[in-house]
Image: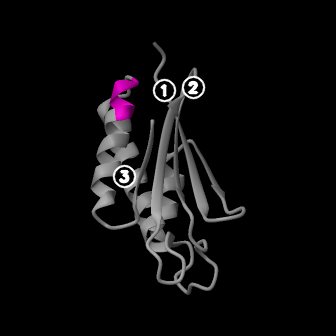
Amino acid sequence: MNLVMPAEPASVPVLRRRATEFAREQGVGEELAADVALVVSEAVTNAVKYAGAAGEAGVVELSARRGDDWLELRVRDRGKGFGKGSVDGLGLGLSIIARLSADLRIVQEGEGTEVRMRFPLPAE
């Protein structure tokens, strides 16, 4: 699954819902689906905040895929990156994402930021 939406607050619930639907399609239970909803909300909210360059409207990209025994979600923006010239630091959102996901990677190379989150899938 790959989606691109405007970096605006209205995109947060749309991307959260689509990520949750994708997770459920992969056979996750309600607890993990709720975790996916929360981490995507937090990651997309951050992307909306930082996506635009100096007065420009940006976009937020959400991708999701299934591996053999894991679910991976990626949220990306093309902004200047968080923590660069901002006074608010990493914030509560990333600590929530780190606590709920089995693996969290934040990549700030080139343009923007990509937040990669992995969750183990239940054994079939």
Q: Amino acid at mark 1?
A: Leu
Q: Is 105 on the left-hand or right-hand side of 28?
A: right
Amino acid type for the residue under numbered disc 2: Gly
Query: Is disc 3 surrounded by few (<14), some (14 to 19) or many (20+) residues within 10 Å?
Result: some
Q: Which mark is residue 67?
A: 2
Disc 3 marks which residue? Answer: 38
Which residue of the protein is positioned furthest toward the right in this rendering? 109
Picture residue at 37% right of the left edge, 41% below the top: 19
**Residue 74 picture location, percent across and down:** 53, 47
Would you say the residues marked 1 and 2 are in contact, meaning their CB atoms lie under 8 Å apart? Answer: yes
Name the foreground residue: 100 vs 116. Answer: 116
- x and y percent of residue 16 in the render? 33, 49
Quarter holding the C terminus? Answer: top left
Above or below residue 7? Residue 98 is above
Residue 79, disc: none
What main secondary structure does the magenta stretch of the protein show?
helix
